[in-house]
Amino acid sequence: MSVKSDRWIIETAEQHELIKPFSTEQIRAGISYGVSSYGYDISLSNEFKIFHPEQVAELDPKQDGAAHFEDVTADSVLIPANSFILARTREYFKIPRDILVICQGKSTYARCGVIVNVTPFEPEWEGYATLSLANTSPRPVRVYANEGIAQLIFLQADEICHISYKDKKGKYQGQKRITLSKSG
């Protein structure tokens, strides 16, 4: 496997709608997003799901947890201390069949105690990514829509996979909104 460069990311994004909207350079207004040397810094949309822990004794990924979250549209939100929220990327992705994408949180937020979690973007997965933003600090942390949140690293496989995410009809294929966990 090889890590793909800025040249590959720009060419693939322009020819195959890899990322939409797409910035061919790094935008440094606020927390940066856009192309970097060997990755792409993604940004948050203005849609969030705020978790309210006082309303639930436990979270179960096999049960519908929608009642435990408040939908919020805003330019910024606070992640409560020692809690988390769900958010989605501003960008929509179409991952090629020979590519696997790894996502890591930006250091700006890590320095405030925010951990960004999302599973790898599998070959031929498509959609907006739902992100879990966990605040490990003892104080609330503010996050901003339309600014950077994490970096994607594109890995090209040595051979094409036998079954892609699209082939197996993955349960998060084509998601348009923040998607809570789905069992099965």
Image (spheres, grey):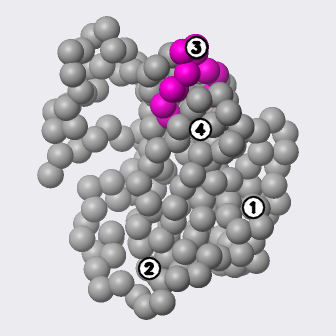
Q: Is residue 14 visible?
A: no
Q: Is tag 4's residue or tag 1's residue first in the polypeptide sequence?
A: 1
Of circles 4 and 3, which is in front? 3
Q: Position of residue 58 (x, y in %)?
A: 21, 22
The residue at the point 23 percent across, 44 percent down is 182
Label placed on residue 45: 4
List the residue tagged with mark 2. Answer: 97
The CA span between labels 2 and 4 is 26 Å
Query: Is 25 on the left-hand or right-hand side of 172?
Result: right
Of circles 4 and 1, which is in front? 1
The residue at the point 63 percent across, 54 percent down is 151
Amino acid carrying mark 3 in the image: Arg
List the residue tagged with mark 1. Answer: 35
Q: Position of residue 53 (x, y in %)?
A: 33, 14
The CA span between labels 3 and 2 is 42 Å
The CA span between labels 1 and 3 is 32 Å
Q: Is tag 4's residue or tag 3's residue first in the polypeptide sequence?
A: 4
Q: Is residue 139 magenta?
A: yes
Q: Position of residue 84 (x, y in %)?
A: 45, 26
